[in-house]
């Protein structure tokens, strides 16, 4: 496996580009007009699709980088909590030039080397996988706090690690600042921040879950993509009765669209780990909504990621947790739980649905990769190093 | 040979193919351009580079770059005639993290290369880290066109250097400047604490350095929600600590099994270790300790009827609100504003009074006589997270859920025309007594405009 980083841009002189242009013309002629025509058509199609998606080429100046979500046709959504923005980046769908590898070892070591630092200063924030190409995107901070430098890297299916350069990239931006409308002038909002905990792209709409540093409450922001309309806010003031007889107003930590009873729902994970469902159509039609708690997975825990996948004709939901091990729930069990009345009494930590404990004990991030594999970012129990590997769904 | 990715967006397959062919042709071209005999394949320094060196230089905007200087005119000419591809540059002039060329296959530092009039220059994608050594190698440009076996060992390097930027000597000076609530007594169901630092801090490792201690010094176990992304203000000077609400809410399992983090009648100390790093990498100047006593849980909503409003006498006198209990400090800073009779927002400055038991607003311009209102967002909370529109925890089975419409309450006051005119002789304002809100609470807020609930 080659460890050479993908060069991201070059400052070679103008004469070099000229030379290359001439060369390319020669090569193209030699290679045949067919390839040329195909390439031009293809690139034109891409340009057209980018402009259809409202993306314009230019520099993206991230203040931070966090949650990632794949959008339509080579678009990657990227949350910048410090910059109070979500970007749609036209990252394209490049394919690996080499053979697919099962495992990229020493991932944090390699990334640290490329970023000129030690692995302990590499903070991987989120991971997204383009299932068409198997390319894995990683949002990374080098360093912390004011010194933190956001970087977007991609790991090709052949193990090659490169940067997605943001100097000149087709993009669109949406503002998710927690500030009120411009006409309602309030004072001193600068300390306010919304940390985006999850992004999901569902039926042409980007859903944004966040955690405010001032209010412990739950909102879901929704914005159609291409970014044209306003950001709408649905107050998911969850009266999930799971906590004894009392309402709670907890924020969503992670969520995922999920088909339940033939309808698209949002399946949301909360602090203390109730699993709550909301019909998507109601989220769109109502300003506030009561969720239905279909499962309790245990207190003192944050569900950090929900991953849905299929294997062998069966659907599964994988729940990654902050303080508990990963949990694997069969889709059939979720369907059954959804049919039952919601949990409204105080219950134990394993109620509503049963779960398996998958062989992913050290997984940090997981995403669906292909019909047979999940892409897993794993921290070795032996030496603490990170690796990225294609994990067979048969081994769950 | 691998194809480089294009800057910005990578193109789909056909373009990659094209680039591949391109690169191959480029390589062969530059290979032709290198005059035989100057290559460094003999295991010694190639001729003409003995006076060369790799060194730090200043790049754009004062950033540090690495340059090769003292190359022979012939080498420079060759580079100009056939500039290396990006891949080629990484091969002939790599800069590695560490003190030697890695043997474990770790890649060189990401960056861009350019050929300046005096020699090649490497500009890293992210600034070099002070105190971190880097190992740079310059090999003969013939390497750039070497056949594409990435595993092939380079011919003997012409030049190498280990470069380290001096780590800045930073004196600890940052302190915890304020804590909110700063009252000596705090309700058992306190929802959040704000820590204000005197300078920007480092994120990511904070909770290891923040402790809640009981009276005898024992540590309260995991009292705070510790999400991966710590809840800092954008400028990294204010940290929000949310108590685990699972332990605050009645009926929630941890509350009943572990108990609330704070127990009425007991005394606690919040400690921020000196080891916490600020954004410069310096530790705090001192350990921060704040001791408070815990009182009974606050399970009542704040009511504007219990507030006292003191209207301004005129001029630029402030309008002032006093509350019978402390309210949430951060929310007080921006959840109230002043409007004129016409609904225009009045520009000015907000001051939160000591112990967060009052709020004061001073307009930027003198008051114009007439009717005004302090407009309060009903999401304003007390220390226990009870807001003007709902309690933090409510017994749902006993009654209908409370109104949750986000809205505002308007507290009217007037500034007399006379006092507004004679603002140079301020009169002692008269307190008007308990507030009476005007209008029904719940004027609908524009969807998507108000902060989340």
Image (spheres, helix red, strand yellow):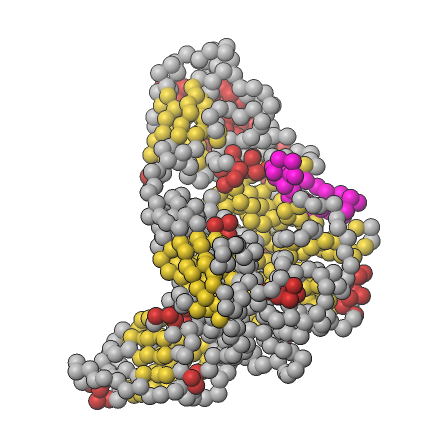
Q: Is residue B50 left or right of residue A343?
A: left
Residue A371 to residue B306: above or below: above
Which residue corresponds to the image point at 58% horizontal and 81% vertical from the top-left? B402
Q: Is residue B312 left or right of residue A231?
A: left
- State the image coordinates of residue A271 (x, y, percent, origin top left): 62, 62
Q: Quadrant for residue B367, please give it.
A: bottom left
Which residue corresponds to the image point at 40% horizontal and 54% vertical from the top-left? B288
Q: Quadrant for residue B168, please give it.
A: top left
Identity of the residue furthest to the right in this view: A313
- State the image coordinates of residue B40 (x, y, percent, origin top left): 48, 14
- State the image coordinates of residue A28 (x, y, percent, origin top left): 59, 34
Which residue corresponds to the image point at 67% horizontal and 75% vertical from the top-left? A245
Residue B432 to residue B286: above or below: below
Which residue corresponds to the image point at 76% horizontal and 64% vertical from the top-left? A352
One can see residue B348 in this view:
yes
Q: Residue B208 versus residue B164: which sits nearer the camera?
A: B208
One can see residue B123 in this view:
no
- State the image coordinates of residue B170 (x, y, percent, origin top left): 34, 41
Magenta extent: A369-396
Residue B35 to residue A338: above or below: above
Q: Quadrant of the N terminus of chain B?
A: top right
């Amino acid at each position: 496996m080659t460890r050479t980083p993908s060069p991201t841009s070059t400052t070679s002189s103008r004469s070099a580009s000229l030379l290359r242009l001439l060369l390319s013309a020669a090569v193209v002629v030699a290679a045949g007009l067919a390839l040329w025509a195909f390439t031009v058509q293809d690139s034109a199609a891409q340009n057209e699709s980018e402009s259809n998606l409202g993306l314009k080429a230019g520099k993206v100046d991230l203040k931070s980088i966090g949650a990632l979500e794949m959008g339509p046709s080579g678009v990657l959504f990227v949350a910048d909590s410090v910059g109070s923005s979500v970007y749609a980046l036209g990252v394209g769908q490049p394919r690996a030039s080499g053979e697919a590898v099962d495992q990229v070892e020493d991932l944090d070591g390699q990334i640290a080397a490329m970023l000129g630092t030690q692995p302990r200063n590499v903070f991987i924030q989120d991971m997204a996988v383009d299932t068409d190409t198997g390319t894995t995107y990683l949002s990374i901070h080098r360093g912390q706090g004011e010194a933190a430098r956001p970087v977007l890297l991609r790991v090709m299916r052949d193990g090659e690690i490169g940067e997605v350069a943001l100097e000149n990239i087709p993009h669109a931006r949406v503002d998710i600042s927690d500030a009120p409308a411009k006409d309602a002038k309030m004072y001193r909002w600068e300390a306010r921040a919304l940390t985006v905990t999850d992004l999901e792209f569902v039926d042409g709409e980007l859903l944004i879950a966040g955690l405010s540093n001032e209010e412990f409450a739950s909102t879901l922001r929704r914005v159609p993509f291409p970014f044209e309309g306003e950001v709408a806010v649905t107050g998911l003031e969850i009266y999930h009765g799971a906590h004894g007889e009392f309402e709670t107003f907890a924020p969503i930590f992670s969520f995922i669209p999920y088909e339940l009873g033939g309808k698209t729902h949002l399946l949301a994970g909360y602090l203390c780990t109730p699993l709550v469902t909301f019909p998507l159509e109601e989220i769109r039609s109502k300003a506030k909504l009561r969720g239905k708690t279909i499962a309790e997975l245990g207190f003192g825990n944050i569900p950090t990621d929900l991953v849905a996948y299929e294997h062998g004709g069966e659907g599964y939901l994988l729940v990654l947790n902050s303080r508990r091990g990963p949990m694997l729930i069969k889709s059939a069990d979720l369907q059954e739980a959804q049919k039952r009345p919601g949990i409204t009494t105080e219950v134990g930590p394993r109620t509503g649905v049963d779960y398996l404990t998958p062989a992913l004990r050290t997984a940090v991030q997981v995403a669906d990769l292909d019909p047979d594999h999940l892409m897993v970012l794993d921290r070795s129990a032996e030496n603490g190093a990170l690796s990225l590997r294609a994990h067979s769904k048969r081994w769950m | 040979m691998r194809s480089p990715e294009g800057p910005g967006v990578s193109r789909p397959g056909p373009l990659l193919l094209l680039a591949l062919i391109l690169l191959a042709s480029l390589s062969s071209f530059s290979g032709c351009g290198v005059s035989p005999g100057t290559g460094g394949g003999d295991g010694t320094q190639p001729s003409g580079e003995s006076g060369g060196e790799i060194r730090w230089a200043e790049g754009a905007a004062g950033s540090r770059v690495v340059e090769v200087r003292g190359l022979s005119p012939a080498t420079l000419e060759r580079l100009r005639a056939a500039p290396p591809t990006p891949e080629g540059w990484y091969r002939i002039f790599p800069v590695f993290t560490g003190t030697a060329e890695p043997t474990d296959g770790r890649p060189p530092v990401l960056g861009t290369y350019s050929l300046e009039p005096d020699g090649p220059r490497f500009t890293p994608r992210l600034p070099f880290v002070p105190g971190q050594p880097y190992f740079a190698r310059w090999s003969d440009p013939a390497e750039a066109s070497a056949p594409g076996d990435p595993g092939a060992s380079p011919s003997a390097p012409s030049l190498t250097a280990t470069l380290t930027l001096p780590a800045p000597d930073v004196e600890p000076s940052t302190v915890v400047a304020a804590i909110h609530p700063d009252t000596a007594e705090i309700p058992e169901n306190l929802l959040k604490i704000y820590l204000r630092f005197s300078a920007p801090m480092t994120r990511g490792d904070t909770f290891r350095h923040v402790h809640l201690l009981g009276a005898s010094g024992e540590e309260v176990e995991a009292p705070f929600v510790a999400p991966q992304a710590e809840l800092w203000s954008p400028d990294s000077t204010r940290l929000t600590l949310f108590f685990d609400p699972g332990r605050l809410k009645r009926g929630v399992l941890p509350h009943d099994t572990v108990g609330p983090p704070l127990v009425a009648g007991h005394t606690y100390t919040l400690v921020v270790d000196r080891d916490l790093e600020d954004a410069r990498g310096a530790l705090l100047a001192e350990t921060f300790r704040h001791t408070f006593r815990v009182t009974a849980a606050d399970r009542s909503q704040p009511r504007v009827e219990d507030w006292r409003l003191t209207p301004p006498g005129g001029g630029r006198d402030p309008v002032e609100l006093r509350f019978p209990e402390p309210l949430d400090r951060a929310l007080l800073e921006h959840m109230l504003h002043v409007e004129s009779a016409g609904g225009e927002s009045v520009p000015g400055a907000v001051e939160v009074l000591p112990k967060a038991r009052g709020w004061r607003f001073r307009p930027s311009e003198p008051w114009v006589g007439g009717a005004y209102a302090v407009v309060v967002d009903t999401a304003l909370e007390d220390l226990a997270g009870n807001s003007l529109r709902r309690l933090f925890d409510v017994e749902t089975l006993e009654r209908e859920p409370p109104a949750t419409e986000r809205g505002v309450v308007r507290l009217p006051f007037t500034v007399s025309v006379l006092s507004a005119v004679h603002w140079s002789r301020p009169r002692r304002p008269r307190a008007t007594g308990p507030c009476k809100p005007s209008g029904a609470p719940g004027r609908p807020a524009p969807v998507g405009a108000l902060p989340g609930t």
